[in-house]
């Protein structure tokens, strides 16, 4: 089951994505929001309710937002793939998991433009496998991680590298500079966590291609680590880091330019698409 959140006529709504992925069966009146479904443990009820119903929302008429727009936390894991680090260059694999947070206002939804700040020419993309927490989780053993994950979505971790050198939080939290979506796909429809397969295209050129088993710290290890000191709550979002990328032939700058387009696909989940525009304001 795929579940999307969106703004329609100024209202925050959500629904079950249709088989052709062009729209949704709006479930707001009965269930409230995806976060409320997760808090109530009602995914199976939502699935049964939506079975056989026809889509009543066309995605072309709404604004897509994060699958859980009211998530309490968006946690991101850094330095989680063998690669030359985009800020620090060649560094050894980390001994411990590192994390940072995405703050409110930094994320836009599927097919919503990501905004390139005028403050730097080092705006970058990062495709990431991203998990949505389905149950309250504390002190979870690595082998039990899948039991508290509701589904998978995609993050484009828009990063301003110059400011990331000031602090990770600064570079990772420019307004409307990251994309997330297009929706959450429930875990029961996907392969094992370590077999999740992600690809990223920049203007149609394949620039990232990886499997989750290539991570330094696995999804299971990440959840074990986080829940030692946090109580993860339903709807929390955990993103797992970005792999090395290949350069686009003939492209001088590795950084994002106005007019660029980034597509990130996780097999079985969907494709997150965002174009790059100039930031509308710094006010």
Image (tube, rainbow, N blue to C red):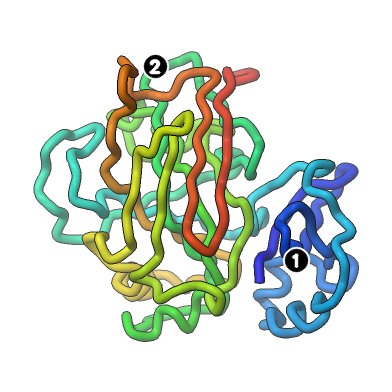
Quadrant (top left/top right/bottom left/bottom right) for the C terminus = top right
Which of the 4 image quadrants contains residue 274? Answer: top right
Which of the 4 image quadrants contains residue 125? Answer: top left
The reply to whether residue 43 is in sight is: yes
The answer to whether residue 261 is left or right of residue 4 is left
Q: Dot 2, crowdedness within 10 Å: few (<14), some or many (≥20)?
A: some
Residue 150 at x, y = what percent?
56, 74
Residue at x 50% of width, y 35% of height: 262
The reply to whether residue 283 is in sight is: no
The answer to whether residue 22 is left or right of residue 96 is right
Whole-Å distance between the Cαs marked 2 and 1?
39 Å
Residue 256: image tag:
none
Residue 99 at x, y = what percent?
34, 54
Residue 16: image tag:
1
- Give the structural element (helix, strand or loop) at label 2: loop
Give the label, 2 or 1, closer to the camera. Answer: 1
Which of pointers 2 and 1 lies earlier in the amino acid sequence?
1
> What residue sits right under mark 2 in the picture?
121
The answer to whether residue 77 is left or right of residue 217 is right
The answer to whether residue 124 is left or right of residue 283 is left
């Amino acid at each position: 089951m795929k579940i999307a959140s969106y703004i329609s006529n100024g209202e925050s709504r959500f629904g079950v994505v249709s088989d052709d992925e062009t729209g949704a069966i709006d479930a707001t009146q009965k269930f409230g929001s995806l976060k409320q479904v997760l808090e109530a443990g009602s995914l199976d009820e939502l699935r049964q309710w939506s079975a056989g119903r026809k889509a009543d929302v066309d995605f072309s008429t709404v604004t897509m937002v994060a699958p859980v727009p009211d998530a309490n936390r968006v946690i991101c894991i850094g330095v989680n793939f063998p690669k030359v680090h985009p800020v620090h260059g060649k560094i050894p694999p980390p001994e411990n998991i590192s994390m940072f947070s995405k703050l409110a206002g930094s994320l836009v939804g599927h097919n919503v433009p990501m905004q390139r700040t005028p403050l730097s020419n080092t705006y970058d993309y990062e495709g990431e496998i991203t998990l949505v927490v389905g149950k309250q989780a504390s002190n979870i053993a690595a082998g039990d991680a899948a039991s508290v994950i509701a589904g998978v979505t995609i993050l484009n971790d828009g990063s301003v590298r110059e400011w990331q050198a000031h602090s990770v939080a600064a570079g990772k939290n420019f307004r409307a500079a990251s994309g997330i979506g297009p929706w959450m796909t429930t875990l029961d429809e996907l392969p094992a966590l370590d077999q999740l397969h992600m690809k990223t295209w920049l203007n149609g050129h394949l620039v990232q291609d990886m499997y989750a088993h290539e991570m330094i710290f696995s999804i299971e290890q990440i959840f074990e680590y986080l829940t030692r000191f946090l109580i993860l709550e339903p709807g929390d979002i955990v993103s797992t880091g970005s792999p090395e990328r290949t350069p686009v032939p003939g492209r001088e700058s590795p950084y994002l330019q106005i007019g660029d387009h980034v597509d990130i696909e996780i097999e079985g989940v969907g494709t997150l698409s965002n174009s790059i525009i100039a930031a509308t304001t710094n006010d």
